[in-house]
Amino acid sequence: MTTTGPARTTGAVAPVVAPMLELRGVRAAYDSIDVLHGIDLVVPAGQVIALLGPNGAGKTTTLKVASGLHPAAAGDVFIAGRRVNGARADELACRGLCLVPEGRGVFPNLTVRENLWVMTYAGRSRSEIEEAAYARFPVLAERRHQHAGTLSGGEQQMLAMARGLATDPALLILDELSMGLAPLVVEQLYGLVADVAAEGVSILVVEQFARVVLGVASRAAVMVAGHIVHEGLPAEIEATLSESYLGAGETEH
Ligand SMILES: Nc1ncnc2c1ncn2[C@@H]1O[C@H](COP(=O)(O)OP(=O)(O)O)[C@@H](O)[C@H]1O
Ligand SMILES: [Mg+2]
């Protein structure tokens, strides 16, 4: 969906495309404890945006608010230019939003293909979903009869991404893709994320450990204690991180 901007007298009229996701002044709480204190975040269409920050900063809560799993106490959430505060997670999924949660969310006791078949609710056939998943992640084809719980961490993350992509989302949200994985595996996964982005899918990635993500992101934001404390180009953000324990943590990772 595109809308044309105000008429101009010279040159072509550039289409004005709303950001895929925008949070404005979002606050959120658990019971009476405030954890988000006014978050502004924009994911422009077709870009990869990284949201970084230490454990407990509020990154996952931000994603939950964006995907309708936790209410905003104040502020606005827009998806493709429409305010969606109060919409349920399944309604937002229908608008093209897909969250791959922390901890991957695959069913360990189902086989790889059964995990993919679950996604037929979105309207694509089993074989269509399997074919797309195996084309993107060939190792999943080799593992298709294995229980997901027996896959390596990297393979489980690929399965989680394949499940998310089965719904053909416009916005893919990835929470801590790298958790518990070896650096080489993380690098490989982010290569795949870059491939998905190159197809035009907008992506919001949350990570505690920053360097690899910054390699694929267009812009990044750093969150600390429920506030965005830095926002900018990856190189600018990397410079701020090297002075903080975020960067130090990464070298140990
Ligand atoms: N379900 C919950 N109930 C109560 N407090 C929570 C819950 N989930 C997270 N929190 C608290 O909210 C804050 C932000 O958590 P979270 O969004 O998970 O941070 P991050 O993803 O950056 O590690 C933390 O202080 C955490 O303890
Ligand atoms: Mg988290």
Image (tube, grey):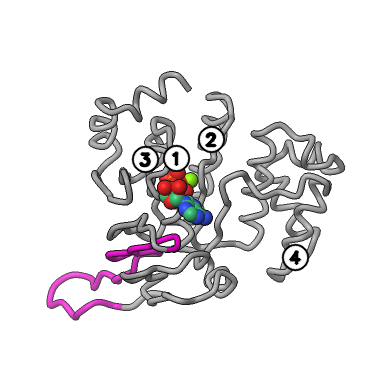
Please state which of the two labelled residues, at mark 2 or mark 4, is closer to the viewer.
Answer: 2
The picture places residue 3, in percent across and down from the top left corner, at 33, 78
Real-space CA distance between mark 4 and mark 1, rounded to the nearest whole angstrom: 29 Å
**Label 2 or label 1, whichever comes before in sequence order:** 2
For badge 3, the amino acid type reads: Gly
**Label 1 or label 3, whichever comes before in sequence order:** 3
Residue 88 seen from this side: yes
Q: Which element carries disc 2, helix, strand or loop?
A: loop
Please state which of the two labelled residues, at mark 4 or mark 3, is closer to the viewer.
Answer: 3
**Does the magenta portion include 99?**
no
Real-space CA distance between mark 2 and mark 1, rounded to the nearest whole angstrom: 7 Å
| For residue 92, side relative to residue 236 (left or right) | right
The picture places residue 31, in percent across and down from the top left corner, at 44, 63
User: CB atoms at circles 2 and 1 under 8 Å apart?
Assistant: yes
Real-space CA distance between mark 1 and mark 3, rounded to the nearest whole angstrom: 7 Å
Real-space CA distance between mark 4 and mark 3, rounded to the nearest whole angstrom: 35 Å
For badge 4, the amino acid type reads: Thr
Residue under label 2, please give it.
178
Real-space CA distance between mark 2 and mark 4, rounded to the nearest whole angstrom: 27 Å
Looking at the picture, does residue 250 appear above or below residue 154?
Answer: above
Residue appearing at x 24%, y 30% in the figure: 239
Q: Quadrant of residue 184?
A: top right
- Magenta region, residue range: 4-31
Nearest the viewer among 25 and 128 is 25
Please state which of the two labelled residues, at mark 2 or mark 3, is closer to the viewer.
Answer: 3
- Answer few, some or many: residues within 10 Å of disc 1's Cα (few below 14, many 20 plus, some between 14 and 19): many
Residue appearing at x 52%, y 36% in the figure: 191
**Label 4 or label 1, whichever comes before in sequence order:** 4
Q: Which element carries disc 1, helix, strand or loop?
A: strand
Ligand 1 closer than 8 Å to the CB at disc 3? yes
